[in-house]
Amino acid sequence: MQFFVYIAIMQIKIDQQDCMLMPKIARQIFTLAGLFFLALTPVTWSAELVMLERDGCVWCMRWDEEVGPIYPKTAESKTAPLRRVDIDEPWPDDLVNIAKDQFTPTFILVDDGKEIGRMRGYAGDEFFWVLLDEMLGKLAL
């Protein structure tokens, strides 16, 4: 049996026998140090799926019912997490290079501040997934 301790990106392999020879306090400090470095590593996405919406949007509510609960659990969400933007609120500063849209819902795939693709409207979950896959295919992963 072997234990693996990850410190940042470097992997240190420790055999069980070596681990037993190490004093208990040293093992605890070593483990805490590894966890500390992992906690300092920020999780960042370069791409995100921006959903433009507004209060009272019937098609936004339909998307929320049909896709909303599923999306965070999908591979697509890992590539492009969902970000909601209310078009009746001030436009976010980090989206200044992205054209506003009055049609809701509108889904904009953004990567490093640049628009990769845009999907206006929601015509059902099957149509949504097909168009989203096409947009995601344009990403340089």
Image (cartoon, grey):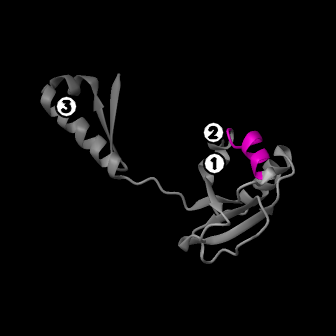
Whole-percent x and y of residue 21? 15, 24
Q: Residue at x 28, y 45 (%)?
A: 36
Instruction: Name the residue at 80% across, 51% down.
Output: 58
Determine which residue is flagged by label 1.
Answer: 77
The picture places residue 50, in percent across and down from the top left corner, at: 65, 60
Can I make out residue 70 in this image?
Answer: yes
Identify the image quadrant of residue 85. bottom right
The type of residue carrying mark 2 is Lys
Q: Could you give the CA–CA distance between mark 3 and mark 1, rounded to whole angstroms?
A: 37 Å
Relative to residue 9, is residue 52 depicted above or below?
Answer: below
Do the CB atoms of the residues marked 2 and 1 lie less than 8 Å apart? Answer: yes
Task: Point out which mark residue 73 bears.
Answer: 2
Is 29 in front, or is 100? 100
126 with respect to 7 (left or right): right
Percent of width and height locating residue 119: 79, 61
Residue 63 percent location from the top left of the image = 76, 47
Q: Secondary structure at mark 2?
A: helix
Res. 22 visible in picture: no
Q: Amino acid at mark 3?
A: Arg
* Residue on which the image places disc 3: 27
Residue range (magenta): 60-69
